[in-house]
Each structure stands twice: as structure tokens, then as C-alpha cells.
Image: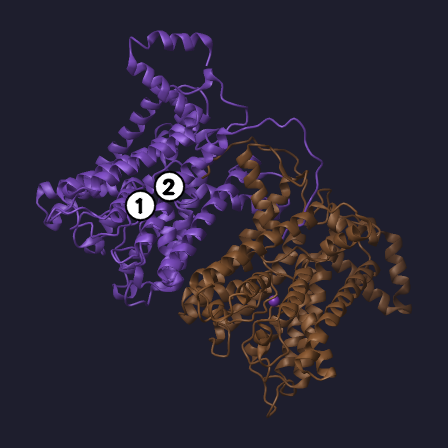
Chain colours: A brown, B purple
Amino acid sequence: MSAATRSGARRDDGVSPLRALRTALADVTTSSPARFAIVVFTALILITTALLALPIARAGERQWTPLADALFTAVSAICVTGLSTVDMATHWSVFGNIVIVLAMQIGGIGVLTMASILGLVVAKRMGLRAKLVAASDTNPSRVHAGPVSESQAVRLGEIGTLLATVALSAIVIELAITALVVPRLLIEGFDPWSALWMGFYLSLSAFTNTGFVPFEQGMAIFASDVWMLSVLSIAVFLGAIGFPVIFALARWVKSRARLSVHAKLTLATTLVLLALGWVAIGLLEWNNQQTLGGQDPWNRPLTAGFISMMTRSGGLSTIDIGEMNGSTLLVLDMLMFVGGGSASTAGGIKVTTLAVLFLAAIAEARGVKDMEAFERRIPVDVLRLAVSVVLWGATIVSASSIIVLHITKDPLDLVLFDVISAFATCGLSAGLTGPDLEEPAKYVLAATMWAGRVGTVTLAAALAASHRRQLFRRPEERPIVG
Amino acid sequence: MSAATRSGARRDDGVSPLRALRTALADVTTSSPARFAIVVFTALILITTALLALPIARAGERQWTPLADALFTAVSAICVTGLSTVDMATHWSVFGNIVIVLAMQIGGIGVLTMASILGLVVAKRMGLRAKLVAASDTNPSRVHAGPVSESQAVRLGEIGTLLATVALSAIVIELAITALVVPRLLIEGFDPWSALWMGFYLSLSAFTNTGFVPFEQGMAIFASDVWMLSVLSIAVFLGAIGFPVIFALARWVKSRARLSVHAKLTLATTLVLLALGWVAIGLLEWNNQQTLGGQDPWNRPLTAGFISMMTRSGGLSTIDIGEMNGSTLLVLDMLMFVGGGSASTAGGIKVTTLAVLFLAAIAEARGVKDMEAFERRIPVDVLRLAVSVVLWGATIVSASSIIVLHITKDPLDLVLFDVISAFATCGLSAGLTGPDLEEPAKYVLAATMWAGRVGTVTLAAALAASHRRQLFRRPEERPIVG
Ligand SMILES: [K+]
Ligand SMILES: [K+]
């Protein structure tokens, strides 16, 4: 901070404590955006936990909710995961439900903007519009140009504008989806106000990739409804590809602007994973009477496609996941682990991370020096970042699985599924997560959601923020691998 | 091939068909070493299968062995895996046992030399001693210098010398281990000839990382024997670090020659994995009455350390793996997947592959441009190769697990364990592999062993062999990952 600014800030102290606070906040966000994100997330979770633990948040005879369940629900809502250890339809009072809805909304929008802010901070000072465009175009994930100097740091006002832009876009999209869902609910026989409320709730739940359902009967009542499942799939898809890609698509529709490599990679990988999951689930479950086999033949591909889309991390389901074959669960494990797009409401290691790994293998197989995609060269440090993210994810999932396995002694199928679902904030459950889950395991799963959500969002920024100039290079030596 | 050499070969045709054959063979090995390795491996497996299927190979009333079992045993022996679908102690006749022992020996030595040959071919023409040294020093896994020209190609004579050197070293080491094992067997009460035979068999089984046991009671009789378990652990360790590292260590002992980065990385990662597995197995199984809990407290760390070492891919065990906790099985899964050293008798993705991934993540976290280890810079194309190998391994294990799960409907714990054990040619079993395994699943597991063994050995060479000059570079663009 220059001396001029410092004295300026000091002069304003008496006049405007708010401004001092804003300056301090701006300092924190720009000096260590990763730490800032972690602090905000954790604070939000703790506040939500405290509110949910209160007797007033509980339905029926006003009792305290056990800490493990309050914390689990708070983490699940803030991290837009959708797993739950209590009966979400009956456990909470109106107050409790309002807290949960707010947490889910803040979590959903928060993750989006947090990721974008981190990108912003790293991408240095530019106009906001240019920055949003840049997020899909050029250098959002990291810059190799030394520490960010003060003149390049992002101001809090800019962050506010970004937050407003993203939140506004989110609400516009949510309202559009609501408009498509409500008529269907009216036809189903809901009264207008219920249809409006539930329609908005469901749209928000789908677009933020949370996966909570407002109906007591769950999503099963729409198991054969092509319209409803398609609309919700599109909502989850839009939420999961992330705002950089949504903005890029919008610009493409408006002015045929070239799609960035990031947008193309995200869309292509998402569609490939959707197709692979669709076929695999359809084939493996076709004759399982407890799942697809119990439906009309025409209904089965619909369900398979819907479930495949939900692994991006929507987490809605029209069938009982726990009744699926072990082979299908393993397929879902892998799909969930990958998750959705970067800077989106989805979790997982992200589709572009997987794509970059495959691009590296393809370049290696072709014997060429550069990784390439859509006629562009991908710089090699992106591969290192991708490897770091995958190692981080694999470590979290392994450690969590080993601990939960040891606590519960449940079969690996169940444990691995719910742990990956928690890590990738997907919210599908094979049956492990529930009221009967051992209390220590609830804490471990909550920590997994936290690490999966906060970790992947901030890891890139944390790594991107640090940069050291190398003064000399060591002699090269080549170990044998493989 | 130059015109002079071509006419020279033609002139000698009448004089020496052997020389023509040698020339042809040299052409194949140098023009496509990967294809050569795959052809040789597959041919050996088919020959062994045919011999084992014969009634003469079976004990008792001279019947044909079912194709699935003959093939499974052949693959298991040639790939030095040690899994079996028949009772190895009673199913085979003397002839059958001789075939198996030969297959195991050829497979064990073969893999070593094959890997070294591939390295040789790629590393271009040098003196043999220099080459063996080079294998641990500089450029064995790939060279970025365009196609290998004829003058740089490896001659068959060289390959023969290399094979002889490696085989001789292997036999010297095996005899040394035998000398340590036999006295213990004599004390145990075996007659001298049995002790000699079984001692050599066991030493060979351990050093080649096969994991077959000559005693009808299995390894359990030595469950509390510090001497025996230590010697076998050292044998498995030596086999698993690979010849480049063994030679480097020998030179270091003789003349304090600097250890290469490859040798240091292999040793360091192997020791870290050994320690991690040791602690994890010890903690997780301490009170399991079916495994460690049933032993004296002083015996438990011994067993835990032995099992941890065996996941490199020795595959011996003094306890029933199937009785372990799910958490421990998952730990073993991960340890087995990593496997041993490159160009060794061990399987898996290899310890250096894992190390390179972590070096990349560390460089990323420190914000430096180069991956570094032991004061040397690791070139970035090694990371791409490592990523390719891991993707290959993960794909094989996933595909195989999904198919086996769907065939057998067995729990994921068992299936994943045995599939990874097959992929990494480790040979430990949680109980899936056996006479009752569905026949299609036997074929899938056999294919997994084949892919795991042939794949990782040749993948590096296949990728290294291909090289294209890039005439232009595309513009750079940076997707967001994580
Ligand atoms: K979710
Ligand atoms: K083995």
C-alpha cells in the first residue's frame, strides 16, 4: 500500500468506519484470496450450524438438534451437496427450513462468485466485462508474472459488481426454469401458491446443483415425466458448466463470438461423460427389477439419462440408488468424482481437469511436444495444476473412505459411493448417509464435503497466488516411469 | 537400412539362414520394440496354456484341464502374478509343475530383460556397460531426438549380452537368498534335498515377485519367523526395485558412485510406501482377531511390515487377507496399484510414476517452474508419460472391476482387491479368485493380468518410440482446471 493511500485511509477513519472495514476486507481478499474463501465458507457453516441447532429450528416439541446433525445439514446446504442425516421433510420447523433455503442459496451463488472472484484477483486488474469474458477466454486460472502489485489488485467494488452480475444472471436463469416447471406442477394438481413456491424451490435446487426436493414423495412422482426430467436436466447442466461457459454461450448465441477452449472443453467433456454414463447405466441396470427393470422399456433410457446427468452433481434421483448393481455404483463413483465444470456450482475434480489429463496422454501417444485442443496449445503448467487437483481429490476420498470404513464396518460399495458423493457435493446416496450413521462418521463426511468444496475451489487460487522466480535451473535428469 | 547392409544381408542368405533370421529378428525388435514385447509375451502364454491343458500336466486320473483354468494359470505364471483358480498344490502333475516353474522363471527374467531391451532400443547405440549404467543414469525411458537411425539401432548380439547379464545377476541373487533360506528349512526339519529345492523355489518366487509357495501349509508356518520373513522381504524388495537400481546400488557400494535420480526416487518412494503401509496395516488390524489380533503383540508389527512389503508385488502372506477389515483392504488396494520399480519384476503403475506426480504437485504448490528431485530437474515430458501410465492403469482397473462386478455380483471389496492384485501382478487375494469364480470372470482377470503386465512394460516404449517433429506451434490458450 502506498503512503498516499495509507494516509488517505487514515484520514477517512473517523469519517467512515465502513470504508475502513471495506479497505481491510479488500486487503484480505486480495492478499490471500484462498484464505479469504476458506474463512468465509467456514464462518457461513458455523453460523448455519448454530441456527439449525436451536430448538426453534426443529419441528415438533422444540428440542435442540444434535450438533452432528446440525453441522452435517449446515455443511450439506452451504456446500450444495444435498446429503442428509435427518428426515429433511419432517425434522425442521419453518424457521429451520428458511435457514436451510438461505444457506443453499448463499452456498450456491457464493461458490460461483467466490470462484470468479478468485479468478479475478489472479487475473489482475481489468474492466469487469473484460474480466468475465477473460474468465472464459484467456488467463483465469493463473498468471506467471510475479506477485500482484497494488495497482493491479482487485477493489472490493469490483467484487461487488461481479457478485451482483453473477447473482442476477443466476436468478434470471432460475426464474426461467421456474416458468417451465410451474405449469407442470399445476397440471399435477398442486394449488397455485404451492406450485409457485415448489417450482422455484426445485429450480433453485437444480440450478445450484444442490439436489433437495420439496415433495414429500421425492422425485419418484415424476419418474416417467419427460418434460420435468428434461427441464431439470437442463437446469443442472447449466449450473454444472459454470458461469464462464454460460457467458461464453450467451455471447456465441448473440454474436457468434468464438467459443474459448475452456468452453469447448467443458461442453465436450460434459457431453461425452453424459453419453458414457447414459449407455453404461442403461446397459448395466436394464434388467434390475429394483431400478430400470421395474419401469416400462421406453422409460428406462429416460431414467438412465437423467441419473447420468445428475452425477455432474445435481444429485436428484427418481429411483433408489442403493438398489443398483455394484457395477453401476462403480460407474457412478467415477462420474461423480469427475463432477462438473470449473467455477460452477458443481463439485468434483472438474471436467476440464480430466480433459487436460487425457490431452496429455493423447499428446504423449502421438509423440508431439504440445498438448492441443480445438487448434489451441494448452500450456504445460495447466497439466501440473490438473495433476495437483486429482492428487488432492484422490487423497481426500481415500483418507475419508478408510476412516469411515473403519468406523462403520459397512461394505466398500456403500462407503465409497457416499464418500465420493460428499467429496464431489453430488448428494446421491447408496444408503450409508442417514440417521443411523455413526456420529464420528457424520463428522468425517461433513469434513469431506468441506474439503471437496472449499478445497477444489481454492486450491487453484492458492497455487496460482504463490509464485517464485527461479534464479537458476538445476541440471536435467530423467527417471524411468511406467 | 543402408544399401550396403541390405546387399550384405542378401549375400549371406545362402551361407547362413541363422544370420538371416537374426537380422529379421533384430529388425522387428528395433523397428517396433513394443509390438515385439507384446507378441513374445502372448506367444509364451499360449504355449504355456497349451502345455498345461494337456492331461499329462494334471495330477490324478489324466484329464484335460479346462481352458479357463489352464489359461489363467499360464497367464498368472508368465506374468509372475501368483493368483490361481485351481489348488496349485494338488492340481498339477510333475510335468505340470515343471511347466509352471519354467513359465515363472521365463516370465520373471523375461520381464526384466524385456524392459531393459526396450530401454536399450530407445536409448540408442552405446556400449553395453554404458547402457546399463545409462539405464539408471540418464535417458532410458525416452529420447526426444527423432526416429532412431540404423547406426543407432541395437543389435541382437547386444540384446543377448544384456539378457545374459541380467539373467546371471538374477541367478546370483537368487542363489544368495537360497543360501540364507535353506539353513532355516533344515532347522524346520525338512530333509536336505527338499530344503534345497524348496529354498531355491521360494527364493526364486520371492525375487521374481511371483508369490508361489512350495509348502502345502502355505507361508503361515513362518508367521512368527523374523529371519525368514526378513530374508523374503529383502528378496522381494530387490526384485521390486528393478535392475537399474540394483546395478546403481552395486556401483555405489563398490565405488561410492553417485546414485541416479531414478535410483534415489525408487528407493525413497519404496521406503515411504513401506512405512505408510506398515503403520496403516498395524493400526487398522491391531485388534482384528482373525488377523493381527490373533497373534502375540510382538508378532503384529512383524506381520504388518511383511504384508506392507508384499504389496510391492511379492504377493506372499502369512495371514488370510480375506479376513482383513474393509479399511485395510482399501489401503492394500492403493499400495498394490502403485506396485514396484520400473524395469523390475514388480507390477503396478510403478513407484517413480507416483513420485513424479507428487513432484509436479509440490512444484505447483511452491510456485516454481521446474519439477525437482534430489537437486536435479525432471523434464516435463516425464510428467506426461506418468499421467499416461496412471490413466492406462485406472482405465484397466475400472473396466475390469465393472465387468467382474456385473458377472459375479460379488461385493466391491473383494472384486476391487483381486482386480487390482491382478493388474499389478501382486497375487494377494481377498477370496474372489478361486475354483468357484465364474468362467467369464476368469478370462477377464487373465486379460487384466496380461494388460497390467504387458501394458505398463511396453506403454513407455511404445510412446517413446513414436516421435513426430512439429512444424509449427498453435497459439496458446489456458482452460480453467480444478
Ligand atoms: K448436489
Ligand atoms: K506377484
Which quarter of the picture shows residue A215?
A: bottom right
Question: Considering the numbered disc 2 on the image, is that residue within a helix, a strand or a loop?
Answer: helix
Q: Earlier in the sequence, mark 2 or mark 1?
A: 1
Q: Amino acid at mark 2?
A: Arg
Q: Position of residue A46 (x, y in %)?
A: 64, 73
Chain at tag 2: B
- Is residue B87 at least partly visible in the picture? yes
Task: State yes or no: Cβ of the residue under disc 1 lies below 8 Å from any atom of ligand 2.
Answer: yes
Q: Is residue B233 above or below residue B3?
A: below
Q: Position of residue A57 (x, y in %)?
A: 64, 84
The image's mark for residue B326 is none
Question: Considering the numbered disc 1 on the image, is that residue within a helix, a strand or a loop?
Answer: loop
Q: Residue at x 39, y 43 (%)?
A: B451
Q: Is residue A481 left or right of residue A341?
A: left
- Badge 2 crowding class, 10 Å Cα cut-off, few under 14, some 14 to 19, many 20 or more, is many
Q: Amino acid at mark 1?
A: Thr
Q: Residue at x 42, y 71 (%)?
A: A408
Q: Which residue is mark 2?
A: B453
Q: Residue at x 47, y 48 (%)?
A: B395
Residue farthest bottom in this picture = A61
Split into 4 quadrants, where in the image is the C terminus of chain A? Answer: top left
Front position in the image: A157 or A1: A157
Front position in the image: A6 or A420: A420
Q: Which residue is mark 1?
A: B81
Q: Position of residue B296 (x, y in %)?
A: 25, 63
Q: Position of residue A132 (x, y in %)?
A: 78, 53
Residue farthest left in this picture = B191
The verdict on a common chain for dots 2 and 1 is yes
Which quarter of the picture shows residue B235?
A: top left
User: Do the CB atoms of the residues marked 2 and 1 lie less than 8 Å apart?
Assistant: yes
Chain at tag 1: B
Which quarter of the picture shows residue A187?
A: bottom right
